[in-house]
Image: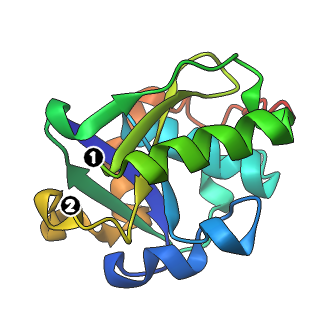
Amino acid sequence: MRLWRISSTHWEKQHEATPWFSAKTSSIAIYHASPLAAVCAYLLRHCLPHPDLIPSHQTLHSVGVSQNLIRRAQVSRHWHFNLKETRDLTLRWRLLADRPVLCVPALNGANQYLIDTRSPLISLIHLYRQDAQALERSLEQMREHLQGSTPWLVLR
């Protein structure tokens, strides 16, 4: 399975630049199931109304993960807002340490994939270095999804 993330940070330093709820979990990187989902997540996180406003230094990263490396979380759709549920989930996943990727529901009902970049199994995740291309070129390839200059609606 291919997963996607927009970031200006190289794979080796993803754990230093990822947003998460505490310093204890700073090594968790958030990935998405498609390039378009990664773009939408970036727009939402940075309150940008259109993909053309994403800074040109951002890069679209892609990794390959086999299904047996993914743990599926059993949490509520709004687990993000429940700090106790979030902490319990992360603690259980990290204590098990059997899979470096955790599949959780995103706010839009799709899935997000949390990657523990400090997991002992991280070497089993394949980085597609050729896909770590300038976001500007990636957006050009996605134009069929972007209705021309029509403004995008980003809900918070």
At 41% from the left edge and 60% from the top edge, which residue is drawn? 116
Which element is circle 2 on?
loop
Q: Quadrant of the C terminus?
A: top right
Examine the image and state in which quarter residue 16 appears: bottom right
Q: Amino acid at mark 1?
A: Asp
Instruction: State whether residue 115 is above or below residue 127.
Output: above
Q: Quadrant of the N terminus?
A: top left
Residue 57 seen in this snapshot = no
Relative horizontal placement of residue 109, taking residue 151 as reference (left or right): left
At 23% from the left edge and 54% from the top edge, which residue is drawn? 63
Residue behind mark 1 = 98
Q: Which of these two is toward me, 74 or 19?
A: 74
Q: What is the number of the mark on residue 121?
A: 2
Q: Contact, CB < 8 Å: mark 2 with mark 1?
A: yes
Q: Position of residue 144 (x, y in %)?
A: 39, 29
Q: Amino acid at mark 2?
A: Leu
Q: Position of residue 108 (x, y in %)?
A: 66, 21
Q: Position of residue 119 (x, y in %)?
A: 33, 65
Instruction: State whether residue 89 is above or below residue 76.
Output: below
Mark 2 vs mark 1, CA separation in Å: 8 Å
Q: Position of residue 31 (x, y in %)?
A: 44, 48
